[in-house]
Amino acid sequence: MDRDLARVAVIGGSGFYDLDRVVDRIEVDTPWGPASSPVAIADVDAAPVAFLARHGTDHRLATASSLGEPAHDGGTVVVINGPRFATRAESRWYRSMGADLINMTQYPETVIARELDLAYGAVAMSKISRRHSSPGRGRRRRSRDR
């Protein structure tokens, strides 16, 4: 398998750090510095697939189920520009529009991939459910929420 011919790549987020059947790892340096982790080349049905752990392989978070929290399968995500959290007013508005989750992760890769004319699909799992909460439940109280 030729590692230079990986036509499919996966960017893993929090909780997704590696693919099975890794056959090679490549250190990558960019004009902005080294990648967060080596790019793993995996053998998936005899095809090379590149994988990068976006936060590095040492970035670990507990899963909802391991913390005794309910896990949800499915829903609608609203992607906002980050890094920032939505205000309570924004959270209420997104909820009124049918949103189940607010996140910042999917936006940058989607835009960059489109600009490069790359096919891109997102599979997301939330690590934090803020549930559009009231102050004091899962976030700091602000002096003013606009």
Image: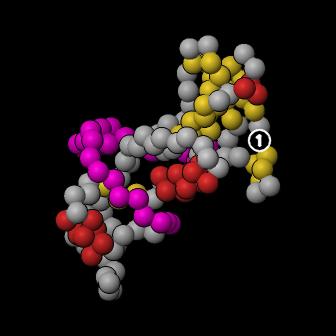
Prevailing secondary structure of the magenta residues: loop
* Percent coordinates x, y for residue 95 in the rendering: 22, 63
Instruction: Give the side of residue 80 with respect to residue 111, left or right.
Output: left
Q: How many marks?
A: 1
The three-letter amino acid code for the residue at tag 1 is Val
Residue picked out by circle 1: 28
Which of the 4 image quadrants contains residue 88? bottom left
Residue 133 in view of the camera: no
| Colour mapping used in the image | secondary structure
Instruction: Give the side of residue 77 with respect to residue 61, left or right.
Output: left
- Magenta range: 55-83
- In this view, the residue in front, 73 or 133, is 73
Is residue 65 inside the magenta stretch?
Answer: yes
* Percent coordinates x, y for residue 38 in the rendering: 70, 37
Residue at 76% x, 57% y is: 32
Residue at 71% x, 46% y is: 35
Q: Residue furthest top?
A: 46
Q: Is residue 90 above or below residue 3?
A: below
Secondary structure found at label 1: loop
Residue at 68% x, 19% y is: 23
Q: Which quarter of the rendering shows the C terminus?
A: bottom left
* Percent coordinates x, y for residue 44 in the rendering: 57, 18
Q: Is residue 109 above or below residue 83?
A: above
Residue at 38% x, 48% y is: 127
Q: Residue furthest front?
A: 117
Which of the 4 image quadrants contains residue 33? bottom right
Which of the 4 image quadrants contains residue 61? top left
